[in-house]
Image: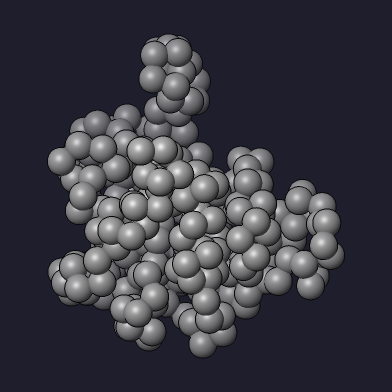
Amino acid sequence: MSARESDRSETAKWDPGFTERVMGWLRPVVKGYHRAETRGLESFPPGGALVVANHSGGLFAMDVPVFATGFYEKFGYDRPVYTLSHDMLLTGATADFFIRIGFIHANHENAEAALRSGGVVVVFPGGDYDVYRPTLSENTIDFGGRTGYVRAALNAGVPIVPSVSIGGQQSQLFLSRGEWLAKALRLDKLFRAKILPVSFGFPFGLSAVVPPNLPLPTKIVTQVLDPIDIVAEFGEDPDIEAVDAHVRSVMQDALDELAAERRFPVIG
């Protein structure tokens, strides 16, 4: 089976009934433990859409459960929410579970197939660089220079829907991405790992990914923004970097507004 055929079969494995059951299991954590809110879905476009989001919370990032819970509550389970994911998540015994609820390997062919099928695709351009950003930079949109998401939306002919979340990066104290530590331990050579994040949390205190600390019950708010039609705003042959700069600017403004609303860390 070719890579393209494998990707298409992967998107076809989304199981709406199973996804609904999983959302039921997650809802007490999302709505209870994290008191999550998802705002702005009223302007969400029909058909395929690329949701471009910041990523927070380290190993226990809740961005996808928070967005998916809000999306499915409003629109039901007729349109899948796919999440472009790291290969490590989709290997081993848990691979089938994640694929059935919409996690798919992160590559352009997979993204295009999911978008053209009318699905909603969530992408975190900053990836691990973003999800482990230091707490002092928790309210900064930083994709680490990655712009491939713009081309993915263009190729599929779908709008970009920016989405920003606040609160997840307060689940523990993120001290450093640990790029220096990964290099010192030669993880970049052995495992192609460029970071080894250092954080402080409960119950183990200081951690470099292991031992994994449990997330604090921080309040998470997700704001979904108005869709961006790239061609309408930037022309048939847009400057990719200009589009990326615009998306990040819109997201930063929205995140600044959420930060201004927040009164206390964790509590919200």
Q: Residue at x 20, y 53 (%)?
A: 97
* 143 or 3, nearer to the observer: 3
Q: Residue at x 29, y 42 (%)?
A: 90
Q: Is residue 2 visible?
A: yes
Q: Is residue 175 visible?
A: no
Q: Quadrant of residue 233?
A: bottom right
Tell me residue 81's x, y (percent): 39, 67
For the N terminus, the image quarter is: top left
* 5 or 243, nearer to the observer: 5
Tell me residue 2's x, y (percent): 41, 38
Q: Quadrant of residue 173?
A: top left
The reply, left or right, for residue 195 in relation to residue 13 is right
The reply, left or right, for residue 258 in relation to residue 56 is right
How many badges with numbers are in the image? 0
Q: Reply above or below: 121 against 177.
A: below
Tell me residue 38's x, y (percent): 42, 77
Q: Reply above or below: 157 against 91.
A: below
Q: Residue at x 46, y 18 (%)?
A: 188
Tell me residue 53's x, y (percent): 52, 60
Residue with the most extreme front position:
1
For the C terminus, the image quarter is: bottom left
Q: Reply above or below: 93 against 154.
A: above
The colour scheme used here is one colour
Q: Residue at x 56, y 84 (%)?
A: 43
